[in-house]
Structure formats: structure tokens, C-alpha cells
Amino acid sequence: MYSKRVQKLLANANPGDRVNVNGEYEGVLMPRTQGDADAVILKLDSGYNVGVKPEKIRKLKGGVALENFAAKKIKKKSGLPNLAFIATGGTIASRVDYETGGVKMVLTPAELFAVVPELEGKANFSVSAPFTLASEDITPKDWVKLAEECVKKLNSGAEGVILTHGTDTLGYTAAALSFMVDSPKPIALVGAQRSSDRGSFDGALNLSCATQYALSESREVAVVMHASYDDDYCFAHRGTKVRKMHSTRRDAFKSVNDSPLARVYPDKTEFLQEVRKRGAGDAVSRAAFQEKTGFVKVYPGIDPEHLEWFVDKGYKGVVIEAFALGHVPTLTTNKKKSWLKVMERATREMPVAFATQCIFGRVNPNVYRNLRVMKELGVIYCEDMLPETAFVKMGWLLGRGEDPREKMLENVAGELNSRLTEKHFI
Ligand code: ASP
């Protein structure tokens, strides 16, 4: 919704109209999707979109008809299982109408169903959209909202959840839901690398497979995305062990230090490892997050001030993406660059955890002297946990009032894998 002030200014102008804003910008008024309630979006003649805070809006001649995308209401049929369909935005919910220059950025779930008609007949979907955001704009507060929405839906008859989400931070949200929802039923997070107006749209297969996984025997939170470049099947990756490993490829998501849980086809799920099985009973929310949780990556020559900042600002815990086995600059001859002092201070004030920026493999505090020094300070070495997962887990534990020094290395949702083998490195 626009703010009252903008609604007044827009009394005579509709999306698709050509308008002049503030006597300065001329272009086509775009439909409002999200963001600042005090701004309007214009498509300029150059093709670029701009957001402008309007003081004056004047309607001009020469608007365009914005395309209306087909929408499909999936009819409820008796005998079909119920699934929750929670939509949050991202590329899977985007479409650009290049021809008219009109943009309708956000597909409603009904419009998405029109693009993926195969979903009809698989389940009865109970649709909700708690917010519409690109995933780069999603915050831990939204994770809590989503966890609560999943629990609400699961406890009102849903056999599983499909949650559509932008891909950029899909791994973080998957980890958050893995910790925050104790679910007896599967939760499938799904996105798309290409929007539905493109021939290479990957969302159709991803959605079909996510639906299949949400109906499966598993009760794990998983990310269901293309397994390869082809349109044949997806992998279901454990929510705490998955990472976006490529900025554009359709098979960007990989399991890290783990095998995928399952190979998922539109009509069957083949499990590739033991999973916790679907059960009866209610889902329970364990949603909480301490927002004063820090996350920092070390780099050669990094100034210890980076960590000092978190301590000064009263952060309650920090995860550090350390080098390889868990190194930070320690015994360097350049005293100003040594992290020893700041680590002494930080570990006195809050839990500090190390995860490896190698991504694959595990940290190990016992191999080198530098590492042992840090271990003696009480640093938590996060084994083979993904740095992002370690960050989410630290914030979640702190939010619940639990001590990460005691709980960080307790396996809650498969985030720790004690048996890494050859096959876990791709
Ligand atoms: N930036 C988008 C997002 O994460 C990209 C995508 O959805 O793939 O929301």
C-alpha cells in the first residue's frame, strides 16, 4: 500500500499511465509491488526504472496497457492431500513483460500456478504470502515470521510446506527454519534462477519437485532445486548443509559436507541417505533470533578493529569465517595486525565461533600452535558447519537464551557431520 499522501497524489493516475513527477521525471507509472510506501516507480523512456518521492504528479498523454498475466485458481478436489504454499518473492515470483515495457514484477501464487499448471491435481494448496521481498532484503525478523507461518499451517492440516523464496539468501532461511521449526512434516524451500518469462525458467521443475518432496516421507527442512543443467530432476538438500555455489547456473545449489537427501523427480522421491521420517503430532515453533549477532570474514592483513567494533557495539556473539583450519592473524610480526589481544577481549565478553572460509572440510584447533592459542581462549571451532549456518545457529541460540559455548556443537538439524568422506567434496 502507498502512504496516504501518495494515494492522494495518485488519485487520477493508474499503473500504465504516462506521468510527470515533480516537474522533473517523465515515464510510465509502474504497479506498486514492495518497498517505500512514499515512493512511486517510473519506467523512464531510457528503459530504466526509478523510484521517486512525489510532491506533484501530472498525468500526460500516451500511457501503455500493462499486460495482465494469466492466473489460475487451483481448484480444491476432495481426496488430495493439503499442502501449505507460502510465497515470499524473489525471481521465482518475477516476470518482466519486455514487449510493452510494462513490468509486473511480482507474480501472485495464482499467476505462478498458471505458469506451472502441472501442480494441479497433486495437492490442495493453502496459499499465503506473509511478505513479498527479494531475498537480499529478508532479515532475521522475517525468518521468525516464516517459522511461525510454517507452524501455523502445519497445525491447521497441511501435510507439508512449500516455501518460495529468492535464491540469494535461500540457504540462510533454510538453516533458520531448520533450527526454528520442530516439524513432523517436510518443509521444502524453492526458488528459481531464471524468471518465468524466459525459456530457461527453472522454477517449473523446481516447484513440481518441491511439491513432490513436501508430500514425501521425510520430515527434514530441505532446499529443492535443479540437480543439473537439464530439466530432469532436482536434489533435496538438507537445510543446514546447502549453499548457493554459482551466481547464475540453474544447478547453483550444492550440498556441502553432506550428500543431498534425495533425488526428486516430479513424480517420485528417491532418498540418497537416511532421513528423519514424517510423523504425527503438532509442529512446534522454536523461533527466536538475537539480532546483535555478528559475522565477519578475515582476510590477509585485516585490522583487528573489525572485531573490536562488534565488542564495542555490545554484540552478544560473533561468528568468524577464519582461514582453513580456523586461523586468524595471530603471531604476525606486525603487532598491530595480530588478533590476539582483541580475541582475548572478545572471548571474555561473548561467545566467538570459527567456521572455515574453505567452505568444504572442517576446522581443527589441534594442528598448529596459532590454533591452540585461540582454542585456549575458548573459541568455539564449528567443525564442518557452514559459516552461514553457524551464524544462524549462534543468533538462534542467543535468541533463545541458550549459551552457544555449550550448545554450538550439539547437532540439532544435521548441521554437523562427523563422517566426511571423499564423496562429500565436489
Ligand atoms: N536477488 C534475487 C533474490 O534472491 C535472486 C533470485 O531470486 O534468484 O531474491
Image: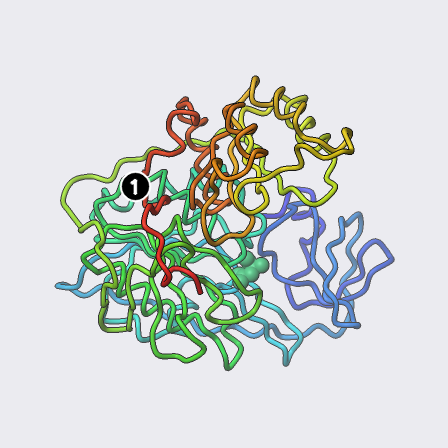
Residue 267, picture quadrant: bottom left
Locate residue 368 relative to residue 187 in the image: left or right.
Answer: right
Is 231 left or right of 45, judged from the image as shown? left
Relative image position of residue 385 (x, y in whole percent): 43, 44
Helix, strand or loop at mark 1: helix
Dot 1 crowding, Cα within 10 Å, few <14, some 14–19, many 20+: many
At x 36%, y 55%, the residue is 258
Q: Please name the residue shown 56% across and 28% down the image.
A: 373
* Relative image position of residue 362 (x, y in whole percent): 45, 46
* Quadrant occupied by the C terminus: bottom left
* Residue at the spot 22% in from the left edge and 53% down from the top edge: 275
Q: In the shown orientation, is residue 178 left or right of residue 294?
A: left
Q: Quadrant of ligand 1?
A: bottom right
Residue 149 in the image: above or below residue 346: below
Q: Quadrant of residue 49?
A: bottom right
Furthest toward the right, the residue is 23
**Place of residue 265 in the rendered image (x, y in percent of width and height, measured from the top left):** 28, 73
Q: Name above or below for residue 408 compared with residue 199.
A: above
**In-image side of 12 versus 186 (left or right):** right
Report the residue marked by disc 1.
151
Q: Nearer the viewer, residue 295 or 77?
A: 295
Q: How is the image coloured?
A: rainbow
**Closer to the camera in the image, 56 or 328:** 328
Report the amino acid beneath label 1: Val
